[in-house]
Structures are given as structure tokens and as C-alpha cells.
Amino acid sequence: MLWRQLVADLRRRSAGRRESGAFLLGDIGDDVRTITDYVMYDTIDPHALDSGYVHVDGRHLGQLWDICRKRKTSVVADIHTHPGGYGQSAIDRKNPMIAVGGHIGIILPNYAATPISRNNMGIYIYQGALEWKTVEKKARHEFFYIGV
């Protein structure tokens, strides 16, 4: 299953010591976004994980857009790990991976080393102008479906 593979890749690349992340690719409909694939940050920017926190140099984003064109997908969201909880850091809030209103950022705790469910992840929707809306825990099951 795609979700399990993604979480395993995040866990492996975090190696229990640094953040890792991925762009989630798929289809964006009027009310539903469907994730069908992903691209790890360090696949498009080999130095994305070097600092301990995730940072993709904008000069490498052209590769992401090329991948999206070839796979006929869009960037649906991004996901990354944190060493502790799943709350947004100041760095996260000030540096959206895709600075377009409506973009979704997901944060997994403990470098994705512990079992992950919708109850223990952060889901944030970028509003523009460095403002974010948090998807509250009670709304996550309806907002984010993990299918087979």
C-alpha cells in the first residue's frame, strides 16, 4: 500500500536523527485530492536533509514539475517528519513547501518511527501570506482518508 511504503521511506531516510520529507503527487478535484505517488525531497535535491531539518532549494523544483508532467499528476500535498510531536515549527510556518493557498502540509511525529494514524499527525492548510489553518483532530478522519 502506498501509505505504508511512504511512511517506511520517511522512517528510513530520517534514520532516527533528522527530518525527511516528500511531495505527495496525484489528482486534485473540486472537493477531493487523491494521492497516487510521491517524490522524496532528497530525490530532487540531494542536500534537502543535510541540515537536520528539511529544506528543498528552489533551484531543484523544476525537476518536481518535470516529474508531475511526465506522470500527469499535480502536487497534492507535502509531508515531513519531526523529531518529537507533529506541531508546526516556526520554520514550517515561515517556509511553505508550495506557497499557494490551499496547499496541504502534513507532519509525522518521532521521525515516523512510531505507528502513525490520523490521530497522531499534523495536517495544515496554507492560507497564503504565511498563514495556516490547522485541521483539528476531530476533523482528520473526514479530511484525510487512508485507503487500500
Image (cartoon, rainbow, N blue to C red):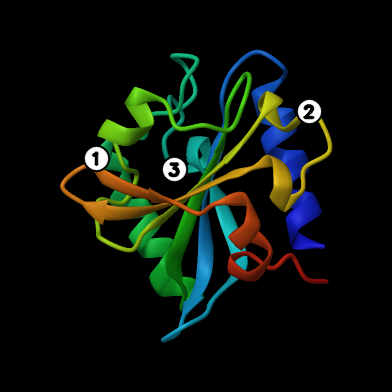
Q: Earlier in the sequence, mark 1 or mark 3?
A: 3
Label 2 Cα neighbours within 10 Å, binned few <14 / some 14-19 / many ≥20: some
On screen, residue 111 above or below 93: above
The amino acid type of the residue labelled 3 equals Ile
Q: Secondary structure at mark 2?
A: loop
Q: Give the residue pinned by disc 2.
A: 113
Which residue does the image show at 51% across and 31% down from the upper left?
87
Quarter residue 146 falls in: bottom right
Label 3's element? Answer: helix
46 or 25: which is nearer to us?
25
Q: Is residue 107 among the parts visible in the rendering?
A: yes
The numbered dot on residue 59 is 1
Dot 1 amino acid type = Arg
Element assignment for label 1: helix
Discs 2/1, front: 2
Q: Residue furthest bottom?
A: 30
Tell me the quadrant of the picture where the N terminus can be found. bottom right
Residue 27 lies, with reference to residue 65, above or below; the image says below
Residue at left offset 39%, top offset 73%: 69
The outermost residue toward the left is 129
